[in-house]
Amino acid sequence: MTDNYSHHSATVSVISVIKTEFARFTYTALVTIVWLFAMLRWCILGLIRSKKFENRRLERYGQLGELVAETKGGAWFHCVSVGEVVAASCVIKALLAKTPEHPIIITTTTSTGAQRVVEIFGNASHVAHHYLPYDLPWLMQRFIRHIQPTQIMITEVELWPNLIHYAAKLNIPVTMINARMTDKSARQYAKISWLFMPMLTHLDHVCAQGQRDYDAYLRLGVVPEKLTLTQNVKFDQVTDNRIPEDIKVFGDAIIAQGRKVLIAGSTHADEEIFWLNVYQYLSQECPELLLVLVPRHPQRFDEVQRLIEIQQLSLQRWEQRMEINPQTQVLLVDAMGVLTPLYHCADIAFVGGSIADRGGHNALEPASMGVPVLMGAYIYNNPVICETLIQARWIIYYQERNRCH
């Protein structure tokens, strides 16, 4: 009986391994197709000299960036973009305060995330940035050998099957920090359990940013011993705000003109149109109102300028900010890394991604400057932050899911 049971268990185990490897093979084949098309697009952008072309993006397709010895052999933090970099920065700064010479590599997949890394850690000799290669076996193995990490910290939701597979193969511990998992995402991952569940078994620990996220990982099969409810580490960001001198000067100039400032920050498509329409209405009652638009993605700067011009509103771009006069109606911030300190100049702020269904960005950024916050109905990305600010009556938000138009 015991022999039969052992034989059955071994058979089930072998079948499970075969299914897992087939799932990863299928996934890798799909990623390879995406990688080829993405690399072709990158080459075309270079040939036509598009503004979207960036030399360092070749690291996404397999090129290894130059890293000094001081940044190898330490902690690897992966952050997809700006929000994840901000969250991870709180942990990284605490680590550097404890061990200043600890090597740290930060990877991102977006150029905006890369720029935020430079803005936060530009002077740190033991911190380096590298773009994350596409999640292909040969690229991940090569990249891991290149940076030689002793531990991997994945921020929020960036789970990649081949990355985690080879980390486990090399006995490199993988921890998720500020881990986020919406109910919708949990249902989607459950549908592809054949690919997702093996990744969870390889995680050494999951630090959940809220009770919702903790419960979701628990339902997906992460054992309680590997789960910790840390709450959202972005709360630590509140004590780390510094206002650059040029923004203080700009704020003083606006005050001297007697202007009121409404900032719409981290906006997505359609949200700018919404606030331009709102501005047309509000400016009739409050002609001294200045609308400051800060699009989330730099590739949309020119598009947003066209939207403003269609509305026939008086416009200045960020480099012209000191030329703002009482007749200027809209300031388009076509620069990265200035939004958080810029909230210092606002009388009220809207946080984007909450009218457009993107889950809402970080409301702590304006709130930490003492600025009241407006948000739309979609606030599921940062539920603990939003609920805390709502209870404190610091956020006004629309509970109905209204369209932008």
Image: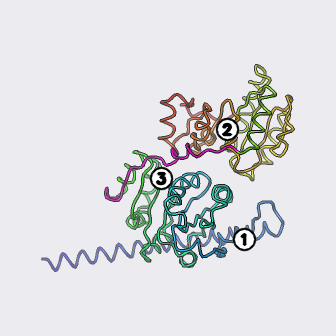
Rendered image coloring scheme: rainbow
Instruction: Give the number of the disc on residue 178.
Output: 3
Quarter of the N terminus within the rendering: bottom left
Q: Residues within 10 Å of mark 2 (few under 14, many from 20)?
A: many
Q: Is residue 250 left or right of residue 116?
A: right
Q: Which residue is mark 1?
A: 40
Q: Residue 233: give x, y in percent of width and height.
A: 49, 49
Amino acid type of disc 1? Leu
Q: Which residue is mark 2?
A: 343
Under circle 3, the secondary element is strand
The nearer-to-camera label among 2 and 3 is 2
Quarter of the C terminus within the rendering: top right
Question: Which residue is found at the position 86% from the left and 29% from the top?
Answer: 327
Question: Which residue is found at the position 75% from the left and 69% from the top?
Answer: 55
Q: Earlier in the sequence, mark 2 or mark 1?
A: 1
Q: Residue 10: give x, y in percent of width and height.
A: 26, 78
Gap between marks 2 and 3 measured at Cα: 24 Å
Q: Earlier in the sequence, mark 2 or mark 3?
A: 3
Under circle 2, the secondary element is helix
Depicted 375 relative to depicted 43: above or below = above
Amino acid type of disc 3? Asn
Question: Which residue is found at the position 57% from the left and 40% from the top?
Answer: 364
Q: Is residue 344 left or right of residue 316?
A: left
Residue 224 among magenta residues: yes
Q: Residue 244: give x, y in percent of width and height.
A: 71, 45
Gap between marks 3 and 1 measured at Cα: 35 Å
